[in-house]
């Protein structure tokens, strides 16, 4: 199972939060560091003075991290893209005749659910409403209905072809983010998509050849 290397709300004691304009094109700039409501943030005192606990919501300065429009587009597009992959994976257990396809679907779900959670948390932290761009569908409704109706080896072949194409689009989305983005959390997720889904494409092509 692949893991996202940078995670919100798990080990950090400073929560990055910004209030951003509605237009993604206006996002470039430093990210303010704001104390959150979770683990306490200790602010060092001056020479000879004791430290203090920061108040929730207190601004603690600016980070060197930057958020770009490419970072936001990537998260807003990849969340519904991953959700469709989960929808496809959920069709596998009652329809497949292949243990390998069943295992592949389980790995896809296990990898992409935490990435959805990380991107949703990140969008909230930068003042964007998750789910605003939920119409993204890499696989058309017609093809999804064909997949729902298929059974046995016909299902397995169609599932693999559609998921390969689905992963290839994810690689294009992640590649665009790697060229244009700046935020370190989105960088980690984009790199995870490229490495993990690239391997899965190779496995799916091998499975498809064996059917």
Image (spheres, grey):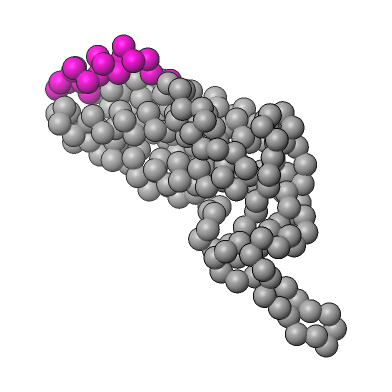
Above or below 64: residue 13? below
Residue at 30% x, 28% y: name it.
Answer: 88
Residue at 54% x, 24% y: name it.
Answer: 172
Looking at the rendering, the stretch of residues picked out in magenta corresponds to 138-156
Tell me the chief SS of the magenta region.
Answer: helix
Above or below 121: residue 13? below
Q: Is 122 inside the magenta-drawn segment?
A: no
Percent from the top left, x then y, of residue 73?
Answer: 60, 30
The residue closer to the viewer here, 2 or 116, is: 116
Left or right position of 53 against 75: right
Location of residue 48 (image quadrant): bottom right
The residue closer to the viewer here, 55 or 62, is: 55
Q: Which residue lies furthest to the top in this view?
A: 142
**Quadrant of the drawing holding the C terminus:** top left
Q: Can residue 157 be seen in this view?
A: no
Left or right position of 79 against 187: left
Residue at 34% x, 40% y: name it.
Answer: 109
Location of residue 139 (image quadrant): top left
Residue at 35% x, 38% y: name it.
Answer: 108
Q: Which residue lies furthest to the right in this view?
A: 47
Percent from the top left, x then y, of residue 158?
Answer: 27, 18
Percent from the top left, x then y, of residue 23?
Answer: 68, 29
Above or below 77: residue 60? below
Left or right position of 91 against 177: left
- How many marks the image carries: the answer is 0
Percent from the top left, x then y, of residue 33?
Answer: 71, 57
Left or right position of 164 against 20: left
Q: Is residue 7 visible?
A: yes
């Amino acid at each position: 199972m692949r893991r996202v290397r940078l995670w919100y709300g798990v080990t950090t004691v400073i929560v990055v939060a910004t209030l951003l304009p509605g237009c993604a094109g206006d996002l470039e700039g430093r990210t303010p560091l704001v104390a959150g409501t979770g683990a306490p943030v200790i602010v060092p005192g001056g020479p000879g003075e004791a430290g203090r606990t920061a108040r929730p919501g207190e601004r603690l300065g600016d980070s060197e991290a930057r958020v770009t429009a490419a970072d936001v587009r990537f998260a807003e597009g990849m969340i519904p893209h991953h959700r469709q992959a989960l929808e496809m994976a959920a069709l596998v257990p009652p329809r497949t005749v292949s243990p390998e396809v069943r295992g592949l679907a389980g790995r896809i779900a296990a990898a992409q659910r935490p990435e959805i959670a990380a991107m949703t948390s990140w969008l909230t932290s930068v003042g964007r409403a998750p789910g605003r761009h939920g119409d993204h569908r890499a696989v058309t409704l017609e093809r999804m209905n064909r997949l729902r109706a298929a059974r046995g080896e016909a299902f397995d072949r169609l599932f693999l072809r559609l998921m390969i194409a689905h992963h290839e689009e994810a690689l294009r989305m992640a590649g665009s983010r790697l060229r244009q983005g700046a935020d370190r959390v989105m960088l980690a997720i984009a790199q995870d998509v490229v490495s993990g889904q690239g391997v899965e494409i190779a496995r799916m092509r091998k499975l498809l050849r064996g059917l």
